[in-house]
Image (cartoon, rainbow, N blue to C red):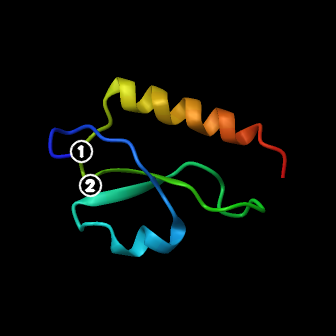
């Protein structure tokens, strides 16, 4: 992520140990009967169009996963 681009799926148990300059973005509703899934990005930095499109695609795909 030092170059400003990186994709990682972070398990909920590891979410508390991310670096302070990284923020986690919700991918799937935490109230859903599944694991919470996040995308990590540098805190305070706007998402690139590619990152936004990727996140939208992941959210759309996970919304179709049966509970």
Q: Residue 52 or 3: which is nearer the viewer?
A: 3
- Mark 2: secondary structure: loop
Q: Residue 42 or 10: which is nearer the viewer?
A: 10
Q: Which residue in the structure is indicated by mark 1?
A: 45
The reply to whether the C-beta atoms of the residues labelled 1 and 2 are less than 8 Å apart is yes
Q: Residues within 10 Å of mark 1 (few under 14, many from 20)?
A: few
The residue at the point 38 percent across, 42 percent down is 7
Q: Which residue in the structure is indicated by mark 2?
A: 43
- Mark 1: secondary structure: loop
Q: Quadrant of residue 49?
A: top left
For residue 11, above or below residue 42: below
- Residue 3 on image: x %, y %: 15, 38
Give left or right: position of 67 versus 48. Answer: right
The residue at the point 75 percent across, 59 percent down is 32
Q: Quadrant of residue 60?
A: top right
Give left or right: position of 43 versus 57. Answer: left
- Residue 67 on image: x %, y %: 84, 52
Residue closest to the far right:
66
Mark 1–mark 2 distance (CA, rounded to whole Å): 6 Å
The residue at the point 26 percent across, 55 percent down is 43
Give left or right: position of 48 versus 67. Answer: left
């Amino acid at each position: 992520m030092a170059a400003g681009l990186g994709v990682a799926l972070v398990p909920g148990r590891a979410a508390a140990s991310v670096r302070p300059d990284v923020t986690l973005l919700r991918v799937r509703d935490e109230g859903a009967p599944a694991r919470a899934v996040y995308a990590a990005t540098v805190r305070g930095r706007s998402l690139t169009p590619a990152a936004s499109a990727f996140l939208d695609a992941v959210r759309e795909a996970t919304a179709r996963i049966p509970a």
